[in-house]
Image (tube, rainbow, N blue to C red):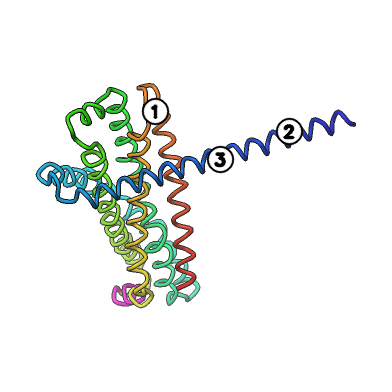
Amino acid sequence: MLLLNDRRQSWFGAFVSFLGLSWLQWMETVRRIGAFTLITLGVVVTKWGVAGRVIRPEIREQITRCGLRLFPTVAFLGFALGFVIIGQTVALLSKVGATNLSGVLMVTVVVRELGPLTAALLVLGRVGTAAVIELGTARALGEVEALEALGIDPIHYLVVPRFLGLTVSIFCLAVYLILVALASGWIFGFLQDLPMKPSEYFGQIAAALRWEDFLLLTLKTLAYGSLLSLVVCYHGLAQPLRLEEVSRATARTVAQSVVGCVFVDGLFIVLYLLL
């Protein structure tokens, strides 16, 4: 009996130690990413306009890479989201005679939650992972040190364009996805012969929207873009890497980015409830 109690205490102690160590590691990562964020923001402010002929094309390239090239995929996801969620919801509400609630549900589910989060996760999966591999490989091969030897600030040249490009792209993609999803939801309802005219459908959505929705949608997407770009660039550049460590850095980027997006989403849910 005493031996069993000793084993339970040892397992409990090991579990507590594991949780404590994991918590300390996460806090250290948050501290380092926070310091990297301050450095990046400082470079954006102090070197705004410096080497514009070099930086502006890089920003446009990142917007094209993160935004324009993902438009077909976002359109497909928007149609799927509209058919699967909006169309089914409107159909169920019409069966129970509660179509007057469709606008509130669409704004809550699509505009506030699924649209921004889906756009952010799509950019993370399609562009963020590739950027970590690209930056991590450059760091492992010594290309970052070569830039510093030439007098080029790696933060200004490599991080700032990705920071601005991902932030702008996620905002635009989220708005585009929301519009496509809302339109495809009405198309699904039209194909199902639901007794709801386009003016009634979009009128209910417009009536459910408040000015806070536009403000918080903008802030949420900008927060997603800033978070993802900084986590991606941190794991690609801010620490020495060997080639065999790039894949593990990519896995850490995905895990921490998803956790960060969920945390940001929780903060904005609290804001929605308070407003």
- Provide the residue designation for mark 2: 11
Front residue of this view, candidates 244 and 121? 244
Q: Which numbered dot is residue 109?
A: none
Residue 203 sits inside the magenta stretch: yes
Q: State yes or no: discs 1 and 2 in contact (Cβ < 8 Å).
A: no
Q: Which numbered dot is residue 247?
A: 1
| Residue 243 in picture, x, y percent from top left | 35, 22
The answer to which quarter of the image holds residue 102 is: bottom left
Instruction: Please determine whether, in this image, residue 143 is positioned above or below residue 254.
Output: above
Instruction: Please determine whether, in this image, residue 52 is positioned above or below residue 96.
Output: above
| Residue 121 in picture, x, y percent from top left | 37, 47
The crowd level at tag 3 (other Cα within 10 Å; few <14, some 14-19, many 20+) is few
Q: Residue at x 66, y 36 (%)?
A: 17
Q: Amino acid at mark 3?
A: Leu
Side of 202 relative to 89 (left or right) = left
Give the mark, 2 or 3, whose residue is nearer the N terminus. 2
Give the mark, 1 or 2, whose residue is nearer the N terminus. 2
Instruction: Please determine whether, in this image, residue 13 is positioned above or below residue 31.
Output: above
Q: Amino acid at mark 1?
A: Ser
Per the picture, the main secondary structure of the magenta-coloured stretch is helix
| Residues rendered magenta in the picture | 198-205
